């Protein structure tokens, strides 16, 4: 049979080129598939000097490839979460954030819902509106991680610090959920003491005191801390009076430890709230705790117990390496117990939440919203459950089922798993701690006497299903989200506001110029190591804030050449300090010209600052922003501009004067003699105007400036509760300069009666004035 192709003669010679077969050109003998080809594949040059492959070269191979490729995609889709867990066990990293930004699926408004389940989709969209997209949540996690890094780097550089501790944000906000009404939880981990599970773990003597954990079998999850070795110099946080002597030895007392911590914050007016020190509004909780670098013995089985794919092994290794924390509070059933400390796994839990996928995070959000808007609205069961129990249920469910169950299209199903787990626990009155299952966290809270109504409430939630969930949750006010038009606008504005709320919490740590310069270098290192624009901008803000501090720590000049160099540094740091907000950097610049005696320049700068003021500007450090703040912000900034430019246009911050600040007017040096001082920018502007006109000798304008200052303080214009005492003290100083002694005395007295932060110098000034009057 003639096997020469029918078109052989016609294609024997094309434009004088010898025909080259595919096999000859590429050295391929045959394709591995059955059957015969109708024509021999040919490769030749086209008229435009390109390459033409004639006849069927790939044929069935393409179909085979398509089938294999499609099957591979199907397998990847069904095991998507398992694969993501392998690639990104810690999803709070830069790498995962870059993956989300590059992923086309993550940038869609919603996922593809199989079966066109509009109810699931509607619930998902409501949760995204409330909690944000996954990128929003990961940005928040990165923000808090960066804030912790900045603070802790400063503590490592502090040379005059009596004792070392590390600060960590904790709670749902640090985990990435910024839900309406969330408070700020901060843990201070004291690190000048060793806590070990066994006295045999003492390796070699060092300068730290050593405590041994003595677990109580009747109360798993709690431990006593017995003093084994004491350092030569008493600990700043744990003086000898913090220990309680017994026949077995000296044990660290819970109550005395907390009282000692409260004394260290005497100016802050914090009160005891469980194991924490809280402000009057309970908006901020500070927990001082100890760290053991070892897991307690009864938590060791957690690391090796049987589980499905979650948590990833690398996360388990990190938790084992970190150990646990010890919090000063005993069991609920032993209110008088003074030596039992609770074992806390806050760091471990944060690492676990960082490993959550988006569905797990939204499920966590849905559980918290259910508790707030459904369960706790029933007065008979209000307070029986807490968000920690819900998070524990999610931990157990995530460990017990396939991680690929947690897909967005199965969000309500995942929630139902957690709800069923809670119902089972409430029926049995037993909630096992995730790390120490022998610890019943319901003990002293849920019992057969009060669980019946709670079971009924949870059963009704399960019975109502997704319809009831949507009806209950979507009736709630979602706060400022209703003012923002698009998801992009919501994401940008809410993330910005979160940063403004916490940006002030690193203040007061700088104690010297050398430390401040090291701090600046570390911030510059962070700028280079971060890839996401918002986090980079947050680091730039911190750099500008540190520049303000550096300017206040510069030495005074003594000779002309040195004066020129110092002035040059002042200008460099102060100009960088303009980038913190719209006004505070300019107020410090005006202070610089005031202390150098250039009063006319100071007045021009103050007038410029006052012209920028608006009562609706967004203040930093605010607990809750009003609608007027949101409207002003969204009307004056754009999502495309940098955070630095946004703050310079629409954000208002207080002026922060360090202890012994060189920029503080000499009339107010007593206010910074013993500690730093925070003053509202508008108060400081009016004070500088008064002082300038006082030195110039312009009585009329001096009176007007004093009237403006008095009016501002009396009406509390742009003055919050934390700066009211300082503002009244500043007014008293101005009255005293004007020789209004009685008014000055009343100001100092009023400053000492404020509900929150008290100005330290007010008492000294009142006593001095009283002596002068006598």
Image: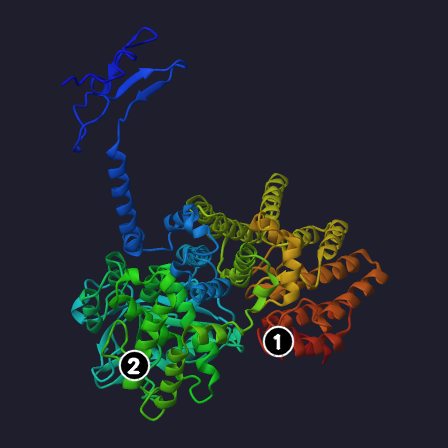
Mark 1 is surrounded, within 10 Å at the Cα level, by few (under 14), some (14 to 19) or many (20 or more) other residues, namely some
The residue that label 1 is drawn on is: 763
Q: Does residue 459 sit above or below 169 in this rendering?
A: below
Q: In which quarter of the image is the N terminus?
A: top left
The x, y position of residue 625, in whole percent, is: 60, 67
- Dot 1: element: helix
Q: Is residue 765 left or right of residue 542?
A: right
Quarter of the figure with residue 274: bottom left
Q: Quadrant of the C terminus?
A: bottom right
Quarter of the figure with residue 344: bottom left
Q: How many discs mark residues in the rendered view?
A: 2
| Residue found at x 39% / y 56% | 156
The x, y position of residue 123, in whole percent, is: 45, 67
Q: Can residue 371 be seen in this view?
A: yes
- The residue positioned farthest toward the right in the image shown: 700
The x, y position of residue 87, in whole percent, is: 29, 50
Q: Which of marks 1 and 2 is nearer the N terminus?
A: 2
Mark 2 is surrounded, within 10 Å at the Cα level, by few (under 14), some (14 to 19) or many (20 or more) other residues, namely some
Q: Can residue 664 be seen in this view?
A: no
Q: Does residue 318 sit above or below 40 in this rendering?
A: below
Disc sitting over residue 425 in the figure: 2
């Amino acid at each position: 049979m003639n096997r020469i192709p029918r078109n052989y003669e016609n294609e024997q010679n094309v434009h004088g080129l010898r025909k080259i077969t595919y096999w000859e050109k590429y050295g391929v003998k045959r394709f591995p598939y059955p059957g015969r080809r109708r024509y021999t594949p040919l490769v030749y040059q086209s008229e435009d000097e390109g390459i033409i492959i004639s006849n069927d070269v790939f044929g069935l191979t393409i179909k085979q490839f398509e089938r294999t490729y499609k099957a591979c995609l199907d397998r990847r889709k069904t095991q998507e979460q398992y694969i993501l867990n392998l690639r990104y066990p810690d999803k709070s990293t830069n790498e995962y954030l870059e993956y989300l930004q590059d992923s086309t699926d993550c940038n869609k408004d919603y996922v593809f819902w199989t079966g066109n389940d509009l109810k699931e989709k509607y619930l998902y969209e409501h949760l995204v509106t409330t909690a944000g997209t996954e990128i929003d949540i990961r940005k928040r996690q990165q923000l808090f991680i960066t804030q912790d890094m900045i603070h802790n780097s400063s503590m490592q550089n502090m040379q005059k610090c009596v004792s070392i501790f590390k600060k960590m944000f904790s709670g749902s906000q640090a985990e990435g959920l910024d839900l309406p009404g969330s408070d700020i939880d901060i843990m201070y981990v004291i690190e000048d003491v060793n806590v070990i599970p066994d006295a045999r773990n003492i390796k070699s003597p060092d300068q730290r005191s050593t405590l041994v954990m003595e677990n109580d079998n009747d109360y798993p999850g709690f431990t006593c801390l017995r003093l084994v070795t004491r350092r030569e110099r008493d600990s700043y946080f744990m003086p000898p009076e913090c220990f309680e002597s017994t026949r077995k030895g000296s044990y660290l007392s819970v109550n005395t430890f907390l009282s000692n911590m409260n004394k260290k914050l005497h100016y802050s007016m914090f009160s005891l709230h469980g194991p924490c020190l809280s402000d009057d509004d309970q908006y901020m909780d500070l927990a001082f705790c100890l760290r053991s670098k070892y897991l307690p013995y009864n938590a060791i089985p957690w690391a090796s117990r049987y589980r499905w794919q979650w948590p990833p092994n690398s996360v388990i290794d990190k938790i084992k390496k970190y150990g646990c924390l010890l919090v000063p509070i005993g069991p609920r059933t032993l209110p008088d117990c003074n030596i039992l400390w609770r074992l806390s796994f806050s760091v471990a839990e944060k690492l676990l939440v960082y490993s959550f996928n988006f569905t797990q995070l939204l499920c966590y959000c849905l559980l918290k919203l259910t508790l707030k808007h459904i369960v706790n609205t029933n007065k008979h069961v209000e307070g029986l459950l807490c968000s920690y129990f819900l998070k524990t249920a999610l931990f157990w469910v995530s460990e017990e089922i396939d991680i690929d169950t947690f897909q967005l299209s199965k969000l309500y199903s995942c929630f139902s798993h957690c709800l069923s787990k809670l119902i089972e626990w409430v029926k049995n009155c037993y909630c096992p701690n995730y790390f120490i299952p022998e610890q019943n966290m319901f003990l002293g809270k849920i019992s057969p006497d009060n669980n019946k109504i709670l079971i009924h409430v949870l059963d009704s939630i399960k019975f109502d299903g997704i319809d009831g969930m949507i009806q209950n949750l979507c009736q709630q006010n979602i706060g400022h989200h209703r003012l923002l038009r698009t998801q992009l606008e919501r994401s940008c504005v809410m993330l910005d506001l979160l940063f403004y709320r916490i940006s002030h919490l690193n203040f007061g740590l700088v104690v010297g110029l050398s430390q401040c310069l090291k701090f600046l270098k570390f911030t510059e290192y962070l700028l280079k190591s971060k890839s996401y624009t918002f986090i980079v901008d947050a680091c730039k803000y911190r750099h500008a804030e540190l520049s303000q501090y550096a300017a206040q720590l510069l030495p005074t000049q003594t000779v002309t050449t040195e004066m020129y160099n110092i002035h040059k540094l002042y200008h460099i740091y102060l100009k960088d300090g303009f980038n913190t907000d719209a006004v505070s950097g300019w107020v410090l610049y005006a202070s610089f010209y005031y202390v150098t005696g250039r009063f006319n320049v100071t007045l021009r700068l103050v007038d410029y600052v006052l012209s920028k003021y608006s009562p609706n500007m967004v203040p930093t450090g605010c607990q809750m922003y009003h609608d007027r703040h949101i409207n002003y912000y969204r009307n004056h900034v754009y999502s495309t501009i940098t955070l630095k430019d946004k703050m310079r246009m629409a954000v208002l911050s207080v002026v922060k004067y360090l202890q012994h600040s060189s920029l503080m007017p000499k009339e107010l040096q007593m206010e910074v003699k013993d500690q730093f001082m925070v003053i509202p920018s508008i108060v400081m502007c009016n004070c500088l105007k008064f002082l300038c006109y006082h030195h110039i000798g312009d009585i009329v304008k001096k009176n007007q400036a004093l009237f403006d200052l008095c009016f501002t303080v009396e009406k509390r214009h742009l003055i919050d509760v934390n700066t009211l005492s300082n503002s009244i003290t500043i007014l008293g100083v101005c009255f005293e300069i004007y020789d209004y002694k009685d008014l000055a005395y009343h100001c100092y007295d009023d400053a000492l009666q404020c509900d929150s932060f008290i100005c330290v110098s007010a008492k000294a000034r009142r006593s001095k004035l009283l002596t002068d009057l006598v």
